[in-house]
Image (spheres, helix red, strand yellow):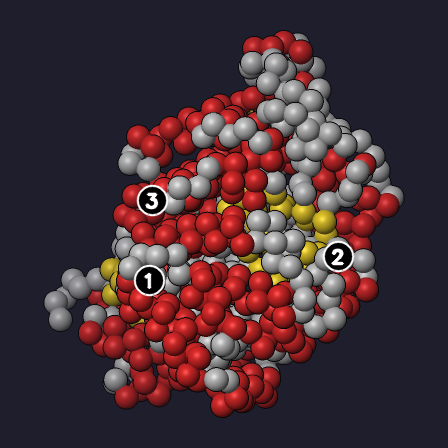
Amino acid sequence: MNDRPKTSPKSPRSPQSPKPELQPVVNESGIEIKPLYTAEDVEQNGGVGFLGKPGEYPFVRGIHPLMYRHRPFTMRQYTGFGNPEQTNQRFKYLIANGQTGLNVAFDLPTQIGLDSDDPLAYGEVGRVGMAVDSLRDFEIAFEGIDLDKITVSLTINGAAPQLIAMFLAMGEKRGYDAKQLRGTAQNDILKEFIGRGTWIYPVKPSIRLVGDTIEFCAKEAPKYSPVSVCGYHVRESGANPVQEMAYAFCIAKAYADEAIKRGLGIDEFAGRLSFNFNIFGNIFEQVAKFRAARGLWAKIMKEQYGAKEPGSMWMRMIAGGGGGGLTFEQPEVNIVRGAYYALISALSGAQTMALCCFDEAYTIPSEYAQRISLRTMQLLTEEMGLADTVDPLAGSYYVETLTNQMRQKMDETMAEVDRQGGIVKLVEDGAVQSQVSAQAYAMQKDIESGKFHKVGVNCYRVKEEEEHDVQMHPYSEQDTQMQIDSLNRIRGERDNAKLKAALARLATDARAERNVMPAIMDAVKAYASVGEITRELAKVYGRYKEPIRF
Amino acid sequence: MTADRRIRIVVAKPGLDGHDVGAKVVVRALMDAGFEVIYTGLRQPPEAVARIALDEDVDVIALSSMAGSHVPFCRKLKPLLEQAGLTDKLWVIGGNLPKADHDTLRALGFKGIFPTGSKFDDIVTFIRENVRGSVRENVK
């Protein structure tokens, strides 16, 4: 069954005399790849004048002068399932195995602002992440975890205002000073409309809420990163690597504009913006993508926004995940894919790494799969020398040429978005969604026809009988009931007068277009549930209706 | 029902799952194959899927599930489709569907099961060959 691809891989040939049958190779971003690069190619494509030194503008080579020699990338596997007790145990397991940060997965009801006992939550509580209903769940989930040593990233978007508030309130209750508390929330709602789909309110009020969190954190929790702009899911939805970065930057600019409208100076908040990017695909295209984007973002912040602080110009990023590159077929091969993704991420100067686990295409990763991912990252720093020197691929004729070409294409793509009316309009109209979905369809057709090779999928397949499921994470009705019981206990125990007052203030502030975060903080401290807060906001903002457009 | 009526398919995203890349890709493939496709968008509860299927007078009810709640969802959907008199329609499901669940889904009335990695041609052929009633006679 070792069906090799129909077109044979390109064999190396002397570049001086390319044979006529040499097939053109074009990367996913639409750049033709030459069989050989020389210093001439680098010069013809803009040279190395825009490289600078690591830690200096335009930061192409890295945002810090010493990068991993000073501190290796944070290892932050995406984790969470069932109830907070179970998730807390898994957090501790990962920390005991050398993980240096946490990246919390929430279940779908939490992500879209429903309580665990909502009829729409049936069958979904705790399934793809941890169930959260109130502050109590945060208290349990982070019990025994030193928030000074282990930074926490919350993968939450639609319900981000509540969950950021819960995190800060939990920290305060434990005696941490909010002004010193570090951590990240994903909180990138625009990309949820393009892919991932955990939106709640319409586009404009959703952006408003992102603005509220940025403004609130800039003042009350200045070390907290309230937004991690995600090219990741845009890429998963069908965007190519250039579009991934260009759309993410357009989205980041939309949030920056919203924050500036509130009267914030760029340097008051831009240093806390971060990014989350995808990694699957061609190794060199990805490395060039990140280097190019780092320079482009610095340039945008400096030239368009007048940022003065270097931190405001940094494209800080988490990278390493690439679900779209993994396969259901021969799942163990995903371990190897993950290792290459980790390599790309380290070669690209990522601040934080999170690898998709080999079983992740099927289920919530097992402890075993998570440990393998963690070991994969540890191999790079401990055995393979990836933390020894900064930006090791710099100076490669190929990588430098590609870096310049990719940056130019990103710049052009961003200009095109602006010409079409800007990212907010394109998302509201469903135009971006339609475009990336058409590309996803074209790619799927290329995979089915064998034009685009996918090992184990359209070549090098094994017999059907040899394919097997990975072990599935069990779903427990009992855990769901425990979560609902716990929510009901909270509802019985809390000070309902205080709660009502807090929710009333929330509604008033939302109507008056005041920043709703202070009211949400009060509501959360009064043990308001995720669903209660969402309902108050939805009364004012309404709910999003998806444009169906093909 | 006119003789040249095209096969009508509703593609639904059941439950809260937001992964719609696959659903949208399949919608395009079904449209290219000449079917008439109604796409529901995200977050359809079982009641909505049954109602849309009935209102739109579809021949095929197709679900796309990626986040693991396919079995509890289909358990809820089955009696609703039966009450709506849609048992003679073709029920199919695609997405992240572990082999261990296939028999359960078949027992719940889902005749076509298309886990991730299924080919467009296979899905289209299966629908053409298994769609029931008057539409079926016009297919060949």
- Report the chain holding disc 3: A
Q: Which amino acid does label 2 sit on?
A: Lys
| 2 and 3 marks on the same chain | yes
Q: Mark 3 points at which residue?
A: A424
Q: Residue placed at 72% from the left, 57% from the top?
A: A148
Element type at marker 1?
helix
Q: Do the residues labelled 3 and 1 touch (CB within 8 Å)?
A: no
Q: Which chain carries label 1?
A: A
Left or right position of A302 against A441: right
Give the vertical position of A124 relative to A262 (above or below). below
Pointers 3 and 1 within a single chain: yes
Residue identified by numbered label 2:
A149
Q: Earlier in the sequence, mark 2 or mark 3?
A: 2
> Which residue is found at the position 35% from the left and 30% from the top?
A416
Residue drawn at x 48%, y 36% is A266
Q: Mark 2 lies on which chain?
A: A
Residue type at the position of mark 3: Val
Q: Name the disc covering residue A510, or none.
A: 1
Q: Pick whichever, A389 or A413, lies toward us.
A: A389
* Disc 1 from disc 2: Cα separation: 36 Å
The x, y position of residue B128, in whole percent, is 33, 65
